[in-house]
Amino acid sequence: MIEKKIRKHLSITRTRLNQKKELEKISKYKNSTLQKVVEAVSTVLNSNYKEEDRQAFQNCENYRTELLQDETLISYQIFGSDKTAMVKDICKNAASSKKWCEFLYFLSKKTAPSLILEIGTNLGISGCYVLKSIQNSPQAQFVTMEGLSQLCEISGDQFATMAPVSKYDIREGLFDATFPQLLKEDVHFDLLFIDGNHQKEPTIKYFKALKDKIKSPAIFVFDDINWSHEMKEAWDLLKRDSSVNFTIDLYKQGIVILDKQETEKNVQFNLHLGY
Ligand SMILES: C[S@@+](CC[C@H](N)C(=O)[O-])C[C@H]1O[C@@H](n2cnc3c(N)ncnc32)[C@H](O)[C@@H]1O
């Protein structure tokens, strides 16, 4: 445990010390998607926010504050478990932190995707940030998937206060059922946040299957790439996949860019955004 923590801090320190050089190295590549991802990182690092961004964040964080007081019990029966947990604890343990939500917001705002996929809605915290990021993009839509029906209901109620129902679609059910269904549809995503089922096999499976369901360019965001040995292995495989042009390792999240116009392949960068 201590060894794991030391390794994490050493890796992050190395990346932080090297950050300026790494940014210079990235700036030499003229790929506009790569540059927009880096702009999103820099915007969050420098808290370079406009008033409208701050207001959007405040709105999402007010929702988080409400959830952190909510003692409603959520059943995990759909996963074949007797477990229950309070909303406030689920929010504390599973929802993305403010900084990573802000990053997702700018990633979306700067790259202006038309169709965003999230695997793992949870309580809809990251979803709120996504909806805020596309509120001025009339064509943009958001699809998000979750197994726990009570969480779908809570997220749906919140989303309804933020956007017209035509902007979002919450797919309820176990991914084993909802994912194959999604693959049958004529949908093509350009921003994909993979934040459910953090294990090697499903992560690789989602990536391989979703490669046929993307536009070009497309950005995948994989959460918790260093969370376990399995997830590290998954991240190593993803980085080396022959379809991948660029990856940015942010330690917590891994960004993968696929761009059919780009000739560079498997170029890997490391940046630090936060813990
Ligand atoms: C880490 S949380 C998502 C957090 C959310 N994206 C956020 O940042 O606020 C992952 C979610 O995926 C759901 N999930 C995990 N495995 C699943 C599966 N096999 N089928 C359906 N839902 C699943 C969990 O119930 C959980 O709510």
Image: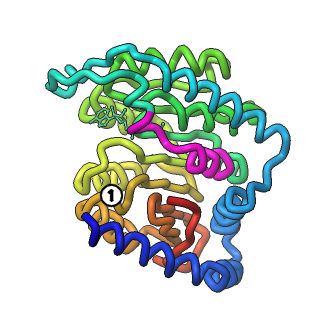
Tell me the magenta residue range. Answer: 92-107
Mark 1 CB lies closer than 8 A to ligand 1: no
Q: Amino acid at mark 1?
A: Trp
Residue 26, relative to residue 67: is it above or below? Answer: below
Residue 80, relative to residue 182: is it above or below? Answer: above
**Res 84 → quadrant:** top left
**Could you say where residue 106 lies in the image, as x and y percent from the top left?**
68, 50
Give the position of the N terminus as an image quadrant: bottom left
Q: Nearer the viewer, residue 255 or 272?
A: 272
Q: How is the image coloured?
A: rainbow
How would you rate the neighbour count of disc 1 (Cα within 10 Å): few for under 14, some for 14-19, many for 20 or more? some
Give the left or right position of residue 184, taking residue 215 as reference: left
Q: Nearer the viewer, residue 93 or 118?
A: 93
Quarter of the rendered structure image containing ligand 1: top left
Q: Which residue is mark 1?
A: 227
Question: Is residue 269 rendered magenta in the image?
Answer: no
Give the left or right position of residue 199, taking residue 258 as reference: left
Q: Is residue 134 visible?
A: no
Q: Nearer the viewer, residue 32 or 260?
A: 32
Residue 157, relative to residue 76: is it above or below? Answer: above
**Could you say where residue 157 lies in the image, as x and y percent from the top left?**
54, 14
Residue drawn 71% across and 47% down?
109
